[in-house]
Amino acid sequence: MALGLDETPTDQDRYPTLSDAGRDTLRKMREHPAAPIFRNQSGNRLTVEDLQDLERFEAQLQTAKAVTAMPSWMSEFIEQTYQDVPYYRQFGARQNFEDVQPISRADLSRDVAQFVPDSVDLSRMMHFQTSGTTGHPLFVPSHPQVAGRYLSFHKRALSRFGITPQAGPGEVGAILLGYQARCFTYVSVTPQMGESGLAKINLHPNDWKQPRDRAAYLEAMAAEIVTGDPISFEALLDVDARLFPKALISVAMMLPRGLRAALEARFGCPVLDIYSMNEVGPIALFDPDVGGHVLLQDRLYVEVLDDDDQPIADGERGEITVTGGFNFCLPLLRYKTGDFGRLGSANSVPVIYELEARRPIRFLTASGEWINNVDITHAMAGLRASRYCLHQQGDKGLVLRLPDRAMGEADKARAILGGVMGALPLSIKVIETDDKQLQYTSEL
Amino acid sequence: MKREGPPLEILLRRLAETPPEFMQEPRIGGRAQVVVPALVNDCVAYFGAPARADTLAQFNTDDPRLRPKLQLVMVLVWLLRHPVLKTFDLSSGDVLSVLEGVPAALGASNAAIYIEDPERREELARTVLAQFKLRPEGESEKQAADRLMAISASERKRLLRASRDAERRAREVREALARKAARESADKWTRE
């Protein structure tokens, strides 16, 4: 039964299968003396039937492989999409894959309702809001089962590093870290893992009675897996806590190699860098052994397109474009992600090499040579900073922005950029906002 | 429809026998092979003078939503090239009006049904004749007008219903996304 427009979900809606043990875990996370202010409420929303479906989904995924060549399911997927999705129905009869016009985030932003299949039951629909850096804010339609499926892909990613999450009743399975002035925070339990706890917390001092509570809380929760993004992980390095997670999982932004090394050294566990987006879910996992991101999904076809939306051969650089996916509320047909990379394979596993968020930008060196931002990314990879923004002015001068807490790396950054760009005027400033920003910009 | 035109059956058979080449993908935004402006120009020139470049520009588009229209134009080109129509003293301008006006008048989203569905075939053939102010051979003016009205009214009603259903569904999706419960969302181990 659907809730009304302004009806607030109850705990029964949030945790339909909650047991007494799960309730105790929620209480433990919420009422610990050092607990942060939890500003919101959320839950797994999974029913018994959902859990059975998720079990089947995970069992099927265990033997499935990420697709390389055109998959056998494509024809049926296109047929179904052209029949069931209003946006595609307006084009008439189904098209061959290569004739399908790619879409972008701007198309979804215009009216995402046109992309939701008629067959989707709306009574349990929810959304994830995403801002991105393209100026096209978006509500991504989703469903509790779709959110539940993320766990299967995280387990798949962890298994590549030999890790099997085992948290169970009374334990905390995952802590999700944010670091923002305002952040959506809550506690929940994961019924697929014995109702182990899940807490989404904000490391920003605003959300704590006193800053040192952060370490006390994290130590008390002793989460098996800690997830976040490079910004929140950079903040975690400043928290004096003795933590022993089995793994850290970083999403949302590219994880610089220097920050990864610092996190691995500090926590003595693998740091997984997952390329993931709200519209598609976890797409690929960085594997240091192959030097690229290995694809994770079996029902997602990944291709690379050039500026004219034409497919380009493996090994050539272009825009990552995806078809399929596991979000049945938003089946994607040639969705251009806005991210760029090269496709290849390693040991028969498909890989995205040199993944970069956003369209390539060229920079003009002191000697008058044009270089691609990929070269800058390579050179700056060792920097211990969660992110940086580089801008080239009309007079060739450079402005590099670093997070406040990474200003100690300024001299190193200056030396690196001098090596790549030559003797150009360079000013180094602090990034003043927590928002996502374009990493590379140029006036030239 | 003052003038008597060709037998309707000839046009119906022509439509039913549309070759697969005329159902291929029209080129949109540089994608696919069939260049519809070239087809249109050949067809118009067959009836006298070639079309002006600015007139042909409307058949050259980057908008994928115009695919059904271009596909229907391709089917019309095939139909209009039947030699029987050449005997009715039609001008290039008349033919261009049909190629511009008929897809807009029918407003359907799938050109294939004008080949595969007998009733839609008849609607297309009669609409083309009416646009030329011709009536099918052997029919009175009134008979031709009545039959065209009956056959297109049922389709218009169906299209209208489908369009209303689509609008209602889109509204329901937007409402579902705006619910407080939808905003609260559900657990994921990672938040992008």
Image: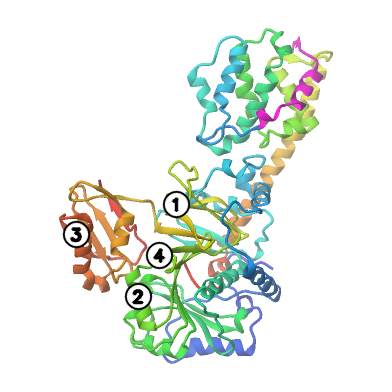
Evaluate whether label 4 is on the same chain as label 1.
yes
Q: Amino acid at mark 3?
A: Gly
Mark 3 highlights which residue? A418
Q: Is residue A305 above or below residue A49?
A: above
Q: Position of residue A137 (x, y in %)?
A: 45, 56
Q: Tell which of A432 and A347 is nearer to you.
A: A347
Mark 4 highlights which residue? A253
Q: Amino acid at mark 4?
A: Met
Tell me the CA gap for discs 4 and 1: 23 Å
Mark 1 highlights which residue? A315
Q: Position of residue A286 (x, y in %)?
A: 45, 67
Quadrant position of the N terminus of chain A in the picture: bottom right
Residue range highlighted in magenta: B2-23
Front tag of 1 and 2: 1
Label at residue A88: none
Tell me the CA gap for discs 4 and 3: 25 Å
Tell me the CA gap for discs 3 and 1: 29 Å
